Image: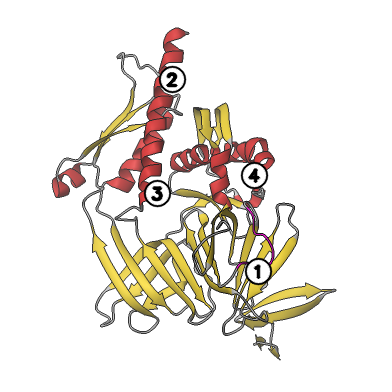
Amino acid sequence: MNMMFGRWPFGRFIYNGRAGMISGAVINYPLQESGFAAKIYDQAGQKLAEYGDTIQNNILTEIEFELDENGCAALTLVFSKKPAIDILYNYRVDIHLFGDPDPWYSGYITRIPLPGTTEQQFTYEGYGFYKQLDNTLVDATYQNTEISAIVKTIMTSYVVPDTDIVYKSSKIVAVGYTVNGIAFEDATAKEALEQLAEYAGNYVVGVDERRELFFKPVSTAIAEDSRFWVGWDAHSFKPEETLDDVKNYLIVKGSVLQVDGTYVLYSNYDADSITDYGLRKAVLTLPSALTTADAQRWGDNQLDKLKTPPQAAEVENIKVKQRLIKAYGKARVTSWDGKHVYDLPITRVIYRVSAEDGISCGLSLGPASTQSLDEFIAKLVRDIKNAEAVQSLINKNLSS
């Protein structure tokens, strides 16, 4: 067997390192035991500065970045004094850990400190490029079109011209379902793509650390870098289960008038869930659906997700061990005594980097049992906009 450990040739496999190729020769880039770097780029993509623990007189003291189901999420940079360059809105920030030449995170600056502050530190905040999908609108109708083809059309027609998100067709995975009719009326690109993921069923959409949009099936496999034993490589573990979000009888309203004179496109329930948890009804709005068949698929997917109590857990103080853990797939967590094993979806990963304390990581597992305030508000706004869109399309139908 041929193996390669670090730079020492024992074969063709690389242990714990990245490989590149120059003129046909394989060059290995082993990851370091520690180390972090933040690279700052202007809006034209020109690199302006680099901060990190290998830089002399480094002033970047803390980094926190999140990876969730939709790719790169929140970012915080803390400097001990004001950077020599002006870090402005929409400047790109790439985070590299353990000397990895590939970024572990890419986002852009959305909040900056102003002159005159009494704070001793200078804090900049940002977000991954998935957030840019909020800034472009989709106004289009698609009929008899496979879902991934719609995603690609939205990317080329709306997203790429208006954002810094990169289109890579191989990251948009075919669904195999053709919608009969779907309409977006001034929906944000994020709303449109998320609804298409819901139509697809167990699909997720997001933007990764390469700024490339992905549209792919949700993974149910155990992620190899996400196996933890509490007390060994994870020091805090809190699992729980909640009934709060369980719904087992769904009514879906749309914008198309049915033969019975109502706008109800779908109604269904799960008898086993009702027996186990009691009757828990909900009314959902789906303005994009133009046919009952499409609403049926969407409603069935929602019912399948909502009919059972979700298990959730928080895992803290994880030994990162030079592994990029993404919010994709499941984590397997074994309790400290080995008696309990949980296989739960990874919904959020938070990396914390400190010039003094090194690199640590925390995970949120399972459907979030408690939403952050911004997520809660975002859901309320989406529900309101869905209801408004339904009414707008109803009014159009009545007047036509």
Identify the amino acid type marked 1: Asp
The mark closer to the camera, 3 or 4, is: 3
Identify the amino acid type marked 4: Thr
Give above or below for 400 relative to 356. above
Query: What is the C-alpha distance between the residues marked 3 and 4?
Result: 22 Å
Query: What is the C-alpha distance between the residues marked 1 and 4?
Result: 22 Å
Marks 1 and 3, the one that precedes in the sequence: 1
Q: Judging from the image, what secondary structure is the residue with disc 4 in?
A: loop
Can you say which quadrant of the picture contains the N terminus?
bottom right
Marks 3 and 4, the one that precedes in the sequence: 4
Q: Start and end of the magenta stretch?
A: 82-88
The mark closer to the camera, 3 or 2, is: 3
Q: Give how far across and how far down residue 133 sits, in percent.
A: 56, 43
Query: What is the C-alpha distance between the residues marked 4 and 2?
Result: 28 Å
State yes or no: residue 164 in magenta. no
Read off the residue under disc 2. Answer: 392
Residue located 32% across and 45% down the image? 304
User: Is residue 196 left or right of 129 when viewed as pictured?
Assistant: left
Identify the amino acid type marked 2: Ser
Give above or below for 164 relative to 311. above
Is label 4 in contact with label 2 (beta carbons under 8 Å)? no
Marks 3 and 2, the one that precedes in the sequence: 3
Q: Give how far across and how far down residue 272 sits, in percent.
A: 19, 46
Identify the amino acid type marked 3: Asp
Query: What is the C-alpha distance between the residues marked 3 and 2?
Result: 26 Å
User: Is residue 81 left or right of 197 when viewed as pictured?
Assistant: right
Q: Judging from the image, what secondary structure is the residue with disc 1 in?
A: loop
Q: Judging from the image, what secondary structure is the residue with disc 3 in?
A: helix
